Image (cartoon, rainbow, N blue to C red):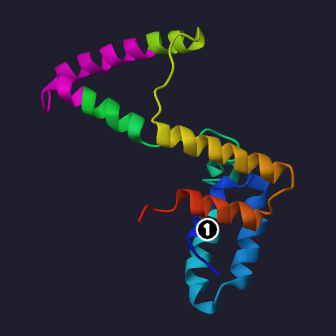
Amino acid sequence: MIDFHSSCLPFLPAEHIGPVFKSMADLAPDRFDGLLAYIRRTWIDNDMWPVHSWSVFGLSIRTNNDVEGWYRRLNGRAGGTPPFYLLIKLLYDEAQVAVRNSELISEGRLRRYQRKKYTFLQGQTHQLWDKYRNGELSSTGLLREFGNLYKPQE
């Protein structure tokens, strides 16, 4: 049956996504044929976004919070919608900061701040992947666990 757990396919290793999708599709009611064809065409069998490019298996999972924070900070510095020449100066200054931050990160002198909630989720995610690698969880079990872990809060 197609449910929230199916949206967790990117948590699987890239080479497992196609077979797992096929087995899920085989069990789905006929009324999902159009949706499954779209998913297969757009994500599973698409050369533009090969499966390995969107599988997050074993990677740190990020949100767009970093980008939103940067955008808010840049907007605050600009004081609204800046004229083009001011925007170019602000972006140049940001590029200089990015270079310096990259150096600090390489030296181990700058760390990313992460809220406790996301640190916990990241830890749980890696524990689940370890269980999957060790054969303690099947593909179905892994997807079910991720569906429960990342489901919307009620």
- Which secondary structure is most common in the magenta stretch? helix
On the image, the x and y values in percent for residue 64 come to 42, 42
Counting every numbered tag in the picture gives 1
Point out the image quarter for the N terminus.
bottom right
Residue at 57% x, 90% y is: 31
> Who is closer to the viewer here, 127 or 58?
127
As drawn, which residue projects farthest toward the right? 135
The kind of residue tagged 1 is: His
Q: Nearer the viewer, residue 59 or 87?
A: 59
Which residue corresponds to the image point at 59% horizontal and 8% vertical from the top-left? 107
What is the x, y in percent for residue 84?
18, 26
For mark 1, does the 10 Å Cα neighbourhood hold few (<14), some (14 to 19), or many (20 or more) residues? some
Q: Residue at x 45, y 36 (%)?
A: 115
Image x and y of residue 124, in percent: 64, 46
In this picture, which residue range is highlighted in magenta? 74-98
Q: Is residue 111 above or below residue 143?
A: above
Q: Magenta stretch: residue 88 in it?
A: yes
- Tell me, yes or no, whether the highlighted magenta stretch contains residue 83: yes
Q: List the residue tagged with mark 1.
A: 5
Q: Looking at the image, is 138 positioned above or below residue 54?
A: below
